Amino acid sequence: MKLCRCVAMSLLVHAPSLAWAHAEVGTAQGLLSGFKHPIFGTDHLVAMVAVGLWGAQLGAPAIWLLPITFPLVMAIGGVVGVIGAPLPLPDLFIAVSALVLGGAVAFGLRAPLGIACTLVGVFAVFHGYSHGVGLRGAENATGYAVGFVVATGLLHLVGISTGLITRWRSGAIAVRLAGTGVAAVGLTTLLATVIAI
């Protein structure tokens, strides 16, 4: 019980920084900046890894289709962000993506491929939008875009390679626990985002 309270307090203490993981509008400077955005934006990071984990749990062809779907659709969301088209509550949907994707991994959700790809694609629009907003007024928009796509792909690969341990019973349990951690980050971020609205 004491451990649960410590974890809950730690999540609440870090909640404000999680909610503002996308506050880099107008600061995009190129490849390195774009590469760092998904890695140091905690909710981006856990959602990207969760896509790979869920794909690995679902097996072929999802193990490749989910991580391919995400960056392709994310690029569309990026264009929406760059042109300044309105997209309601992107930070809220990014937090929800971590919660839902983490939950799918934690519960070992065996969704049909079409539904899994659609869900991943919808969330990818909001992640891409956040990156696209960061591209407005960028010194090197192309470098920034390449950076965040490469980082996203690498995070998916981390999830896939970690998810391969599901072949063993103890590995499957570890992956589900990782999904629980992703969902916890998503829930914390969601609460912080709702409070900030």
Image (cartoon, rainbow, N blue to C red):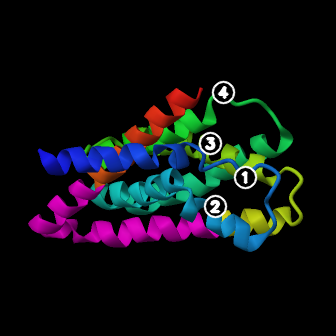
Which residue corresponds to mark 3?
125
**Separation (CA) of disc 2 from disc 3:** 16 Å
Q: Is residue 65 above or below residue 192?
A: below
N-terminal of the pair, mark 1 or mark 4, is 1
Q: What crowding class fits label 1: few (fewer than 14 Cα within 10 Å), some (14-19), or many (20 or more)?
A: some
Task: Indicate whether residue 152 is drawn in magenta.
Answer: yes
Instruction: Give the foreground label among 3 and 1.
Output: 1
**Separation (CA) of disc 2 from disc 4:** 21 Å
Which residue corresponds to mark 1?
24
Q: Is residue 157 left or right of residue 39?
A: left
Which residue corresponds to mark 2?
37
- The reply to whether dot 1 and dot 4 touch (C-beta < 8 Å) is no
Q: Position of residue 31 (x, y in %)?
A: 75, 72
Amino acid identity at mark 3: Val
Task: Indicate whether residue 185 is drawn in magenta.
Answer: no
Amino acid identity at mark 4: Pro
Q: Is residue 8 visible?
A: yes
Magenta region, residue range: 149-178
Amino acid identity at mark 1: Glu
At 70% from the left and 31% from the top, the residue drawn is 87
Which residue corresponds to mark 4?
88
Q: Secondary structure at mark 1?
A: loop
Q: Give the position of the N terminus as an image quadrant.
A: top left
At 49% from the left and 66% from the top, the residue drawn is 155
N-terminal of the pair, mark 2 or mark 4, is 2
- The reply to whether dot 4 and dot 3 touch (C-beta < 8 Å) is no
- The reply to whether dot 2 and dot 3 touch (C-beta < 8 Å) is no
Q: Secondary structure at mark 2?
A: helix
